[in-house]
Image (cartoon, helix red, strand yellow):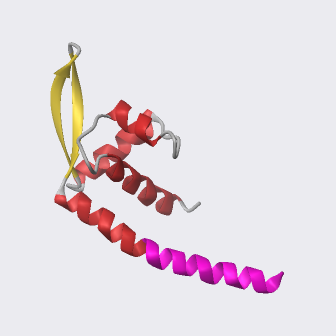
């Protein structure tokens, strides 16, 4: 898969994981696990990128004697998910076209 496409899809997945409530790294990985594997290092790179793009905010709070970062989606992040849903319709149309071409060749 194209690295840029995969990167964009992973960004959307992380945004979707925190869409309804704030969350923290380990929980995000756990919530995504039934759908895809994501390493901690990859997740934290994505979270930093999304924070820089103002698609999420971060707060720190003590939990079990340690500081934990909690991530919350912003209106910009919600807009990106909506944008993705529209883009996905176009991607599905392209997929149907490509698949149609393959079916004709068989």
Q: Is residue 5 magenta?
A: no
Range shown magenta: 88-106
* Image spot of residue 46 (x, y percent): 36, 47
Q: Identify which residue, 23 or 43, lies in the foreground.
A: 23
* Image spot of residue 34 (x, y percent): 51, 41
Q: Looking at the image, is 38 positioned above or below residue 94?
A: above
* Outermost residue toward the front in this view: 20
Magenta: predominant secondary structure element?
helix
Q: Residue at x 29, y 44 (%)?
A: 48
Q: Quadrant of residue 30?
A: top left
* Outermost residue toward the top in this view: 65
Q: Residue at x 23, y 48 (%)?
A: 51
Q: Residue at x 32, y 70 (%)?
A: 83
Image side of residue 37 versus residue 23, left or right: right
Q: Identify which residue, 97 or 55, lies in the foreground.
A: 97
Q: Looking at the image, is 97 positioned above or below residue 58?
A: below
Q: Looking at the image, is 36 positioned above or below residue 62?
A: below
């Amino acid at each position: 898969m194209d690295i840029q496409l995969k990167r964009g899809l992973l960004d959307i997945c992380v945004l979707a994981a925190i869409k309804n409530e704030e969350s923290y790294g380990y929980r995000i990985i756990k919530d995504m696990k039934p759908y895809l594997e994501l390493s901690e290092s990859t997740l934290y790179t994505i979270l930093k990128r999304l924070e820089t793009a103002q698609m999420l905010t971060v707060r720190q709070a003590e939990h079990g004697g340690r500081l934990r970062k909690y991530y919350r989606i912003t209106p910009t992040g919600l807009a990106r998910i909506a944008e993705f849903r529209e883009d996905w319709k176009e991607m599905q149309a392209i997929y149907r076209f490509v698949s149609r071409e393959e079916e004709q060749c068989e």
